[in-house]
Amino acid sequence: MKDFTGKTAFITGAASGIGRGVAASLAAAGAKIAIADIDAETLETTRAEFEAEGAAVLAIALDVSDRDAVERAADRIEAEFGPVHVLVNNAGITLGPIPVTDIDEKMWDWILGVNLFGVVNGVSTFVPRMLHGGEEGHVVNTASIGGLQVNAELQNGSYSMTKYAVVALSEALQLQLADSQIGVSVLCPALVRTTLQESAQRRPERFGGPYDKVVPGHELDMPTMQPRELQPDEVGERVLAAIRNDDFFIFTHPETRAWLEARHAKLMEGFDALDAYLGR
Amino acid sequence: MREFAGKTAFVTGAASGIGLALAKSLALAGASVMLCDIEEEALTVAVSELATIGPPVDGVLCDVAVLDDYRRAAGATFERFGDVHILCNNAGVSRAGAIEKIAEQDWNWVVGVNLMGVIHGIQAFVPRMKASEDECHIVNTASMAGVVGGALSGPYAATKFGIVGLTDVLAAELGGTNIGVSVLCPSWVRTQMPHNGRNRPERFGGPFDLASDTDNAERNARYLAAAELGLDPMEVAAMVLDAIRERRRFIFTHEEGRAAVETHEALIRAGFDAADAWANSRSTLPSGAER
């Protein structure tokens, strides 16, 4: 997909952070943007700012873990902007530094609900409509560099687990849509200036409501192994370029290549061990 | 862990397939084994078969997706055998189809068994493993579908990648402790896996027959044929025991998986090459230029 003029884009988690950055780059490229977020107040501020800059923008307060609500959002966007061409399943949350043995069922429901089912709901709702429309389109799912390897220092295993699942879902979707007019990408950024660490303040009531940012007993100093922090607008530009180029993996931090090479070496060690076991 | 004699193992999905082979191999190696499964009849048969080997074996009926049920099963195991040293989070299910065609209840079923089942296992056993200070090991059954992408089985792919990720996490969280972790990534194995719809609980829609899944008939036929020609589960179990002895993280069973992983790695490399090209194109812009 090269030309975004007059096209419609739907971006979740777009009140701030990466979602906002991607929405800004799509709007600058001429797309009408439907922005969704669970934080209705910030979303309205963002909407007004986009509108002041001349963008065609529609704001929808949305909990992406609610399939019916996502369907309703799709109906509303179609009614106001016409069919969606670019779907950006970006909304995500973190539980912060907490060992996987200490996370209760409600917390698992929440992080799986947003990070995994948010993507499932977006894909399941919009992809059939996009296929039916027959026009060129693109799906971007926001995973993380933590969806391809684990940084022990971050102590954020539940987040990583869900992001591995998002990578898998994106790969499955790309294979499934390989012969269609819809491209698929998965965004795997490292450190970006976002409000991800404020997830706790936005937890919906059905998952227990807002809570203190840090679970008592799990305070964590910022890890030492950190790449350069990017601004959301830079990531937005990167994503736009990647959609135009139909890149599947969208990386934002070249320095993370070494992290994935290290993990790949571990997989290869597994195959070397198999060879040794089989006496080859 | 060099020696299995006198150790206790807890194996989920132990009434058939890889789980049964793991339970049998561990018993043959001298371990006491608690077999855990959702399928009552098969479990009874498996327990009576393994009871003839020698070490104490027993069975516990459990839906691993249900935390309270899992806790009850773990409690019964502690009561029967004391501490557990080897945990095999092996129970797994799948539902075929394009992502948007999978019903929410099937997503919940597959995520419940494949992901939450593993998490419940870790939560039920790791604290006591840590406290015991004995040498312990956890094996999570994922799949080659947990390291390379696949189409038309989104819930399986997502949860198996999730299990591999969770194992990477456990390796980080339990590094340097008395607990080792491995993830099993097999390709085709001769098991009942294609027929796992027989065990779908009522709350997720109840049992279904593979033949009723007409939307995916072609794919299912291929899967059945491939599973028929797959590895003997006992061969897979032997590889797992070897990996536990050597405390190895990744357990692959099919050499052809190496090429698949390398192809996948090439896709990642292409992503970084594209990111580099983009970064270079930006940095060559004159400063202050419109981007």
Image (spheres, coloured by chain):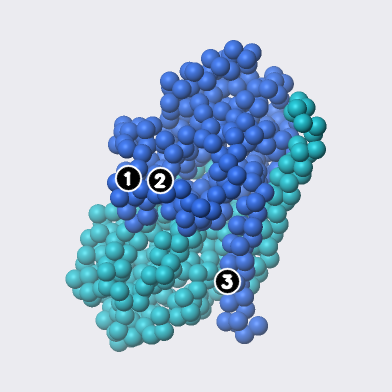
Identify the residue at image location x=34%, y=61%.
B121
For the N terminus of chain A, give its image quadrant: top right
Identify the residue at image location x=77%, y=42%.
B280
Q: CA distance from mark 3 to mark 1?
A: 36 Å
- The foreground one among B267 and A125 is B267
Q: Which mark is residue A96?
A: 2
Residue B216, image x, y percentages = 56, 49
The residue that label 3 is drawn on is A270
Which amino acid type is marked by label 1?
Val
The residue that label 1 is drawn on is A215
Which amino acid type is marked by label 3?
Gly
Q: Earlier in the sequence, mark 3 or mark 1?
A: 1
Within-10-Å neighbours for mark 3: few <14, some 14–19, many 20+: many
Judge depth for marks 2 and 3 and give the one in front: 2
Q: Is residue A57 above or below residue A206?
A: above
Drawing shade for chain B: cyan
Q: CA distance from mark 2 to mark 3?
A: 31 Å
Secondary element at image label 3: helix
For the C terminus of chain A, give its image quadrant: bottom right
Within-10-Å neighbours for mark 2: few <14, some 14–19, many 20+: many
Could you say which chain is coloured blue in the image?
Answer: A
Residue A147, image x, y percentages = 54, 50
Left or right placement of residue B107 versus residue A173 in this view? left
Secondary element at image label 1: loop
The answer to whether mark 2 and mark 1 are in CB contact below 8 A is yes
Secondary element at image label 2: loop
Residue B83, image x, y percentages = 26, 73
Q: Is residue A188 above or below residue B61?
A: above
